[in-house]
Image (cartoon, rainbow, N blue to C red):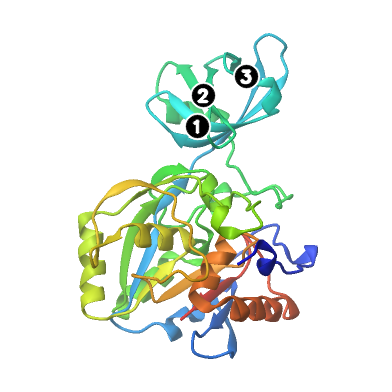
């Protein structure tokens, strides 16, 4: 299967530049795996498509202010450092711009000098290994100096940074939000539980692996960047019980999907933590999930390929064509799709 098989034309004005005032008022395109019929609803109607005993699995990662702007010590040139993955107490894998100016040994200063760093090595991602020097708590310094990194296709300033977090975000570590979860509200979560639908949280820190563009024409040559995931024993018990009882497991987002499928071994989901570079595209046989809640994704992206593996490429592209015709809002702050 080729990269060009996942192309579609999106009018630029359909790229959502800001979230709706109410999270649950996003539109919802319902795609059934057994038919080509689509339903147009609001996200608040999602309970109409869930039943008692279903399990919703969500990613409770929290986005960090991962974008830092510093100055090169020798020249004063502005350097952008985009944190991708923490390696230890002081070292991070990061993207840097302009990369040619940040060779190993380059020293960078942030703010008034309360945070400094040195590029100690090149990284497999094409970025750098950055070692920070600071006094105090790094997370507190990052909160003061860093910015929450919005995707480059969002040009409008976000007035409420918390709108780029899910309402159940707990564990800091992501460079981007698991956007399928942005539509949920505390009230909707209560309604889900009242209906007897089980809510299970797992973790995957979203990094470059989820959004790195595919450049290989032949999909099998694309290599995903590793991302950290964690599934607690309690979550594994709930998920495995549902699998044994043949109840539906619906993933909230592609990141939850990747974590679940990565942890499946010998007939069950393992309680574990580690790094995954799983790449899911058509031909993949899902072991855990039977449904998916997701946003609309960029052309030629690994996310579009993942949902095509679940629902079929032709159906997904037909659904996207329908969404464009009906003027749905696309990408991170856009509308949602439910595949059941």
- The residue drawn where x is 44% and y is 84% is 49
Q: Which residue is mark 2?
A: 130
Q: Earlier in the sequence, mark 2 or mark 1?
A: 1
Q: Earlier in the sequence, mark 3 or mark 1?
A: 1
Instruction: Kindly check if marks 2 and 1 are in contact, taking CB atoms under 8 A apart as contact.
Output: yes
- The residue drawn where x is 60% and y is 15% is 106
Q: Which residue is mark 1?
A: 93
Q: Position of residue 78 (x, y in %)?
A: 71, 22
| Residue 334 versus residue 194 in the image, above or below | above
| Residue 241 versus residue 128 in the image, above or below | below
- In this view of the protein, can residue 278 be seen by the observer? yes
Instruction: Kindly check if marks 3 and 1 are in contact, taking CB atoms under 8 A apart as contact.
Output: no
From the image, state whether disc 3 or disc 1 is nearer to you: 3
Judge from the rendering whether residue 255 lies leftward or rightward of residue 305; answer left or right: left
Report helix, strand or loop for mark 3.
Answer: loop
- The residue drawn where x is 73% and y is 50% is 156
| Residue 262 versus residue 100 in the image, above or below | below
Report, in whole angstroms, how far the alpha carbon at label 2 lies from the one at label 1. 6 Å
Report helix, strand or loop for mark 2.
Answer: strand
Q: Which residue is mark 3?
A: 103
Return the residue found at the far top.
Answer: 74
Instruction: Kindly check if marks 3 and 2 are in contact, taking CB atoms under 8 A apart as contact.
Output: no
Task: For label 1, count other residues whose C-alpha is less than 10 Å away and answer few (under 14), some (14-19) or many (20+).
Answer: many
Q: Position of residue 179 (x, y in %)?
A: 53, 59
Q: Quadrant of residue 232?
A: bottom left
Report, in whole angstroms, how far the alpha carbon at label 3 lies from the one at label 1. 14 Å
From the image, state whether disc 3 or disc 2 is nearer to you: 3
Q: Nearer the viewer, residue 338 or 198?
A: 338
Task: For label 3, count other residues whose C-alpha is less than 10 Å away and answer few (under 14), some (14-19) or many (20+).
Answer: some
Report helix, strand or loop for mark 1.
Answer: strand
């Amino acid at each position: 299967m080729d990269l060009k098989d996942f192309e579609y034309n999106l009018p630029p004005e359909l790229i959502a530049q800001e979230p709706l005032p109410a999270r649950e008022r996003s539109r919802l395109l319902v795609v059934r795996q057994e038919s080509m019929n689509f339903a147009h609803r609001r996200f608040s109607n999602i309970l109409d498509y869930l039943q008692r005993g279903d399990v919703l699995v969500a990613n409770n990662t929290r986005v960090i202010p991962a974008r830092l702007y510093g100055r090169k010590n020798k020249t004063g040139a502005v350097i952008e450092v985009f944190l991708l993955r923490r390696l230890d107490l002081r070292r991070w894998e990061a993207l840097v711009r302009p990369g040619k100016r940040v060779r190993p040994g380059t020293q960078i200063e942030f703010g008034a000098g309360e945070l400094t760093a040195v590029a100690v090595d090149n990284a497999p991602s094409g970025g750098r290994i950055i070692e920070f020097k600071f006094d105090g708590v790094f997370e507190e310094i990052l909160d003061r100096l860093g910015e929450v990194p919005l995707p480059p296709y969002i040009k409008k300033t976000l007035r409420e940074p918390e709108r780029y977090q899910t309402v159940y975000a707990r564990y800091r570590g992501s460079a981007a939000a698991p956007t399928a979860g942005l539509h949920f509200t505390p009230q909707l979560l209560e309604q889900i539980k009242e209906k007897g639908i089980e809510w299970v949280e797992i973790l995957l820190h979203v990094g470059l692996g989820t959004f790195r563009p595919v450049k290989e024409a032949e999909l099998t040559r694309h290599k995903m960047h590793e991302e950290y995931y964690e599934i607690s024993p309690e979550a594994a018990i709930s998920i495995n019980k549902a699998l044994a009882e043949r109840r539906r497991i619906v993933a909230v987002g592609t990141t939850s999907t990747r974590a679940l499928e990565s942890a499946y071994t010998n007939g069950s989901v393992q309680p574990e933590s580690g790094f995954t570079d799983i790449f899911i595209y058509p031909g993949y046989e899902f072991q855990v999930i039977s449904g998916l809640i997701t946003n609309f994704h960029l052309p030629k992206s690994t996310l579009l390929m993942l949902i095509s593996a679940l629902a079929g490429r032709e159906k997904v592209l037909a659904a996207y064509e329908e969404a464009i015709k009906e003027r749905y809002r696309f990408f991170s702050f856009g509308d949602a799709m439910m595949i059941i």
